[in-house]
Amino acid sequence: MSSKNTASVIAIGSELSSGKIQDKHGKYASSLLSGLGFSVDSIVLIPDNENISFFIETRKDKIDLLIITGGLGPTSDDITRDVIANSAGVDLILNNDIWTDLYNLFPGNINDSRKKQAYIPAGFTVIDNFCGTAPGFSGYIGTTLVYCLPGPPLEMQDMLERSVAPSIIKKFNLSEPEILNISCFLICESSLENACKDYKSEEISWGTRVQPYRISLYLQGGDLKGRQQFFTYLQNIFGNELIVLGDRTAGEILVSSLMEAEVKISIAESITGGLIGKLITDIPGSSHILWGSLVTYTNNAKQKILGLAKDLLINYGAVSREVVEEMASRVMLLSDSDISLSVSGYAGGSHDVNEDTGKIWIAVKSRNSMVYTKSFKFTGNRDLIRRKTAIAAMLLAESALGGSERLDSYGKWQYS
């Protein structure tokens, strides 16, 4: 081993090397390794071909640590496990535990392609995949410690954080880094990164992990006071509701606040089609705070299920302050909830994108008749607009629990 911890990252995938999709594997892995004190000397993008073994040969015995992502799936071009075994001079061995898990996961649909995921280089250690089917593995090629992880970003990043980082800390006898975890909502990655760069801290490093409904931000280095000042700086830019301490989803924040307040919520969804209810019920214990979520997608459903007047819909349109406020009032009447939440908007699509696409109305009503209603204009494709709407709705509901003063930074939600 060298006197200084050195590392390299190899990201495998023809889509990455051809530029069809943007590489975030190398950036994320190198950021994590740098935070652990490693000097990352290279990030290499390689297609699924024989070049993999060439680049492994150029790095083995010259660096302490090598992270390899991609090429562990069931298809014929997923050759990473074969290359690693050849480079290590060992055979691929069927791991019975992995094979049993795959067999139980795909009963009646197991074939040789799927079975190849159960083969691991002899002498290597299995790394469990909690977000997918392809496990990772680790072992030595020469004197270089190698970790092989699947390519899908969510799987790779979860394994890096959950399993690989703790393993590296133990194997290299490193000190556990002090990290401030922050959850960022409704903020695009480029805006967040620009703000972090502008802070220009020489002591504090940062890294981001883009997730389906938030960006996780990690601050490390310096002292706790310095990291907290960095956090406050970001809150002043984006708002207290969009920059939150801890690695938490918007649903977890809302459910936690509802439980603490001992109140129950009811929801009437239009544009989101049940997504808000889904995100809340993903959280254990949500049955204590959720009465239910009614998906009233069409005007007919709004009339028949919620009891909205036809004239109201005709005069104001389904996407309006008047309609979402009535939706919130009606779902509260139907329930035994303490507060109600309603959303309506235009998500757009491949054939109906117009100036109204992304126009959203959200209303939150309490039992004392207090109503908080806000309009939004979100950009992005249909899926992204619906996700933003669901997140904004849950954050708005959580903020409304604390009264109107909690909504002081609402104007900063309009970044998109």
Image (spheres, rainbow, N blue to C red):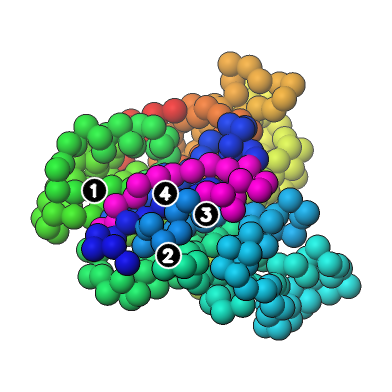
- In the shown orientation, is residue 273 left or right of residue 169? right
Lower position in the chain sequence, tag 3 or tag 2: 3
Look at the numbered disc 1 and give the secondary structure of its residue: strand
Type of the residue with mark 4 = Tyr
Give coordinates of residue 300: x percent, y percent.
76, 38
Identify the amino acid type marked 1: Ser
User: Which residue is identified by label 3?
Assistant: 56
Answer with the quarter of the image where residue 359 lies.
Answer: top right
Q: Nearer the viewer, mark 4 or mark 2?
A: 2
Q: Residue lying furthest right in this view?
A: 108
The answer to whether one can see residue 272 in this image is no
Q: Residues within 10 Å of mark 1 (few under 14, many from 20)?
A: some
Amino acid type, callout 3: Ile
Q: Quadrant of residue 260?
A: bottom left
Q: Which residue is mark 1?
A: 205
> Could you classify mark 2 by the number of other residues whose Cα lies within 10 Å: few (under 14), some (14-19), or many (20 or more)?
many
Disc 4 versus disc 2: distance between alpha carbons? 21 Å
Marks 3 and 4 sit apart, C-alpha to C-alpha, by 20 Å
Q: Which sits earlier in the primary sequence, circle 4 or circle 1? A: 4
Image coordinates of residue 104 in percent, x first then y, are 77, 78
Residue with the mark numbered 4: 28
When the figure is inspected, residue 271 is found, relative to residue 253, above or below; the finding is above
Q: Residue 5: horizontal and vertical position, in percent? A: 29, 60
Which badge, 3 or 1, comes first in the chain's sequence? 3
Q: Which residue is mark 2?
A: 144
